[in-house]
């Protein structure tokens, strides 16, 4: 009976290659792999051609899906190769790490207690090899391990060297015991003993290199049992889920991550000429983006990388040397191409695949079926999707994306549509994140299909919503997601809240989403008749409450209310209902004329009445003259002007009377008052667009600000002016008249 310990790096192509050769030479009759025992039944899928890495084992608590952990694997992960080897050879294989049923059951206080170790010890536990890397002349462990292990050829002596190195690390550095690591290693030893009792003669143990010394020196079974005694438990489930190279850079599961999975992919596929192929990919990428990259560049970069490796006393060029060569040869010391290379080649976003035969939850199956039927690409990198909602298939795609967004699965992000009119156009950017697998499991608590889960989630959000803006925004999401089953429940909740909402700001903020919903109804074919009565009542109540609700307000409250007022005014215009506009104008007029209305809001009401033609320019100018008279406080006048001019200075550009009134008021302010009001005035005029500010500056430079007649600025040349008269006669088809000298 023999036990063979293979200490590896969890995502290492060199370790994976050497491990495969070692297993072929050993021909073990049992393989134990560091990983979650809850997923033992899923190992058999590693031999399925449809399970394409990168993939991850997802272990989660069905009752609390937020308690979950991922164990990712790439093609170059030693554990993945060990599973593939075992399946191909028909060798018993199972995971031997401390079960997540204990680790995920830990309370927050228990985790905090384990974390109470000195900062030095935390750093050493996270990276115990950094002292060896520094002693070898490397700035970081990643580069050192890459050169020492991952770039080397197949070697059966590799694991003996790693074991000896780990013995030195754990004996010389003398770290205090970590409770979690001690339990993990105790459980691994118990699994080795169990394999021995089952009669296996050649047991191969694949584990993180740091654990090898602890598994080599076997203490008594009783002491390990004491460490594992009384651990809490929680019911768990497990499945395979797609992973990405981008997420492979994060620590997860066994706490491992790699900085450049794209480079490691090259090392795995072409170990002898990884540098050459990687530089060729760099040249191809740069040419694809119209950057200069020729075969001569590739040859020069490879030579430079080899030279740098020799100068640094390294056996072959690694990623550091290749990046330095790329920076010098391809990029001309510019960082921009390097960012492109880092994203496309160092990380090399790719998403794994999981076959339909892998057991999973009904909601996940429903999402996968919809993705397949609608031909929506599931990719880790971003892709754009243009939809025309007049087409049935496009509308179904939009509905799916909106339903997932309602479930907090932001697979798609809405983009602005440029150059296209109409609400039937939608532009999306799609990018699938591996973490969505956990969110889908969480969403499974709501239902077994996307429609059922989104409906239940919407009804739950409606029941907990306390304000009208929350509910109106939810109604918009519901109609975009075509959740007819949720409309009645949300409408009832909205009626309850709207009947008891006295806050004017909430009522005004609720109008834009409701009006938008009425618009979307015609585009998407949704039934919005139930909303019509609610909108009617809300507009009526807002118009009644508006005049009184704008009185006796503090400046901060008035500023917040003005934003809601602007949005509500735009919504009333968009609704294009004469009855709405009549009630709205009456309310605005009452607020604008009342002395107790906050000056900021009174100015905004006046602006709205003028813009929509309800007040003439003469009446508007009269109100401005009244509000900017010296009988009122300068601060009140400044607030009124801020509300009146908010967002646009067009009125001042095209109306001489308004300009003159404001100019006269400003010129008549005492110097100390003007200085006191200057920050407020700068804020008012600073919000204008650049062209507006330029035109206002030109008017101000003319002194009075009025338009200067042409005769006053330049003498009339009558001779030149008469030359156009014949052409004018032809254009106007008039009878030639006698010209007078």
Image (cartoon, rainbow, N blue to C red):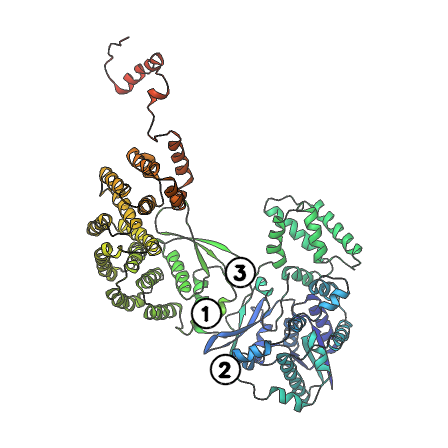
Is 133 above or below relative to 82?
above
Question: In x, y percent, where is residue 646?
Answer: 34, 45
Q: Which sits earlier in the primary sequence, circle 2 or circle 1? A: 2
Dot 2 lies on which element?
loop
Question: In x, y percent, where is residue 713?
Answer: 37, 21
**Considering depth in this image, is 7 or 336 the residue closer to the camera?**
336
Question: In x, y percent, where is residue 109?
Answer: 53, 79
Q: CA distance from mark 1 to mark 3?
A: 17 Å
Q: CA distance from mark 3 to mark 2?
A: 31 Å
Q: CA distance from mark 2 to mark 1?
A: 18 Å
User: In the orientation shown, which residue stands out farthest toward the top?
Assistant: 741
Q: Quadrant of residue 149?
A: bottom right
Is 667 above or below relative to 584?
above
Q: Which sits earlier in the primary sequence, circle 1 or circle 3? A: 3
Name the residue rendered at 68%, 52% in the picture.
Answer: 279
Q: Which sits earlier in the primary sequence, circle 3 or circle 2? A: 2
Name the residue rendered at 23%, 65% in the picture.
Answer: 499
Q: How busy is the neighbourhood of tag 2: few (under 14 within 10 Å), some, or many (20 plus)?
A: some
Q: Are marks 2 and 1 in contact (CB under 8 Å)?
A: no
Q: Is residue 80 visible?
A: yes
Q: Quadrant of residue 543?
A: bottom left
Q: Is 581 placed left or right of 471 in the picture?
A: left
Check disc 1 and report the residue beneath it: 440
Is 601 above or below relative to 733?
below
Check disc 3 and report the residue beneath it: 380
Q: How busy is the neighbourhood of tag 1: few (under 14 within 10 Å), some, or many (20 plus)?
A: many
**Considering depth in this image, is 579 or 131 the residue closer to the camera?**
131
Closer to the eye: label 3 or 2: 2
**Considering depth in this image, is 407 or 424 the residue closer to the camera?**
407
Check disc 2 and report the residue beneath it: 235
């Amino acid at each position: 009976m023999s036990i063979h310990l293979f200490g590896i790096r969890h995502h290492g192509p060199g370790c994976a290659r050497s491990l495969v050769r070692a297993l072929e030479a050993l021909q073990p009759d049992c393989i134990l792999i560091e990983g979650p025992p809850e997923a033992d039944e899923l190992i058999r899928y590693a031999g399925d051609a449809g399970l394409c890495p990168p993939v991850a084992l997802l272990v989660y608590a069905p009752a609390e899906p937020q308690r979950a952990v991922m164990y990712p694997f790439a093609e170059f992960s030693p554990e993945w190769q060990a599973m593939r080897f075992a399946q191909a050879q028909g060798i018993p294989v199972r995971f031997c790490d401390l079960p997540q049923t204990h680790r995920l059951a830990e309370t927050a206080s228990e985790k905090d207690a384990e974390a109470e170790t000195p900062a030095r010890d935390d750093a050493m536990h996270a990276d115990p090899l950094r002292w060896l890397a520094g002693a070898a002349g490397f700035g970081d462990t990643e580069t050192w391990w890459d050169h020492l292990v991952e770039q080397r050829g197949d070697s059966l002596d590799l694991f003996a060297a790693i074991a000896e190195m780990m013995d030195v690390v754990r004996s010389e550095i003398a770290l205090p015991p970590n409770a979690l690591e001690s339990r993990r290693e105790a459980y691994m030893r118990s699994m080795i003993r169990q394999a021995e009792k089952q009669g296996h003669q050649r047991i191969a143990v694949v584990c993180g290199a740091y654990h090898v010394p602890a598994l080599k020196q076997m203490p008594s079974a009783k002491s390990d049992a004491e460490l594992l005694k009384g651990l809490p438990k929680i019911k768990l489930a497990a499945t395979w889920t797609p992973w990405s190279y981008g997420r492979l850079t994060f620590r997860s599961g066994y706490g491992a991550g790699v900085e450049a999975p794209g480079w490691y992919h090259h090392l795995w596929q072409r170990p002898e000429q990884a540098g050459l192929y990687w530089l060729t990919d760099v040249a191809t990428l740069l040419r694809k983006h119209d950057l200069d990259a020729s075969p001569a560049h590739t040859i020069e970069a490879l030579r430079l990388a080899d030279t740098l490796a020799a100068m640094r006393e390294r056996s072959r060029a690694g990623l550091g040397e290749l990046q330095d060569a790329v920076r010098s040869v391809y990029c001309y010391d510019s960082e921009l191409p390097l960012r492109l290379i880092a994203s496309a080649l160092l990380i090399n976003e790719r998403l794994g695949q999981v076959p339909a035969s892998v057991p999973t939850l009904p909601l996940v199956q429903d999402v996968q079926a919809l993705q397949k039927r609608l031909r929506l690409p599931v990719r880790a990198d971003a892709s754009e999707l243009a939809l025309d909602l007049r087409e049935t298939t496009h509308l179904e795609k939009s509905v799916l994306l909106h339903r997932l967004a309602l479930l907090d699965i932001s697979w798609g992000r809405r983009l602005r549509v440029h150059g296209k009119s109409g609400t039937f156009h939608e532009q999306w950017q799609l990018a699938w994140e591996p973490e969505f697998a956990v969110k889908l499991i969480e969403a499974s608590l709501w239902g077994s299909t996307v429609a059922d889960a989104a409906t239940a989630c919407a009804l739950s959000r409606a029941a907990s919503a306390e304000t009208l803006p929350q509910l109106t925004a939810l109604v918009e999401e519901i109609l975009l997601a075509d959740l007819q089953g949720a409309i009645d429940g949300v409408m009832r909740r909205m009626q309850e809240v709207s009947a008891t909402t006295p806050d004017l700001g909430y009522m005004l903020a609720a109008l834009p989403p409701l009006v938008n919903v009425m618009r979307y109804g015609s585009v998407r074919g949704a039934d919005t008749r139930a909303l019509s009565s609610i909108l009617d009542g809300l507009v009526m109540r807002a118009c009644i409450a508006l005049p009184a609700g704008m009185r006796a307000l503090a400046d901060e409250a008035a500023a917040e209310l003005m934003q809601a007022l602007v949005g509500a005014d735009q919504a009333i215009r968009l609704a294009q209902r004469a009855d709405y506009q009549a009630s709205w104008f009456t309310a605005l007029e009452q607020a604008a004329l009342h002395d107790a209305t906050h000056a900021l809001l009174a100015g905004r009401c006046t602006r709205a009445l003028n813009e929509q033609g309800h007040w003439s320019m003469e009446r508007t100018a009269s109100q401005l003259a009244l509000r900017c008279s010296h009988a009122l406080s300068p601060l009140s006048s400044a607030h009124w002007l801020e509300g009146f001019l908010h967002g646009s200075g067009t009125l001042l550009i095209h109306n001489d009377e308004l300009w003159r009134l404001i100019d006269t008021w400003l010129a008549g302010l005492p110097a100390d008052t003007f200085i006191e009001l200057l920050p407020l005035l700068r804020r008012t005029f600073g919000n204008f667009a650049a062209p507006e500010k330029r035109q206002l500056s030109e008017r101000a430079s003319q002194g009075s600000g009025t338009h200067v007649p042409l005769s006053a600025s330049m003498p009339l040349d009558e001779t030149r002016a008469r030359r156009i008269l014949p052409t004018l006669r032809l254009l106007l088809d008039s009878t030639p008249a006698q010209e007078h000298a």
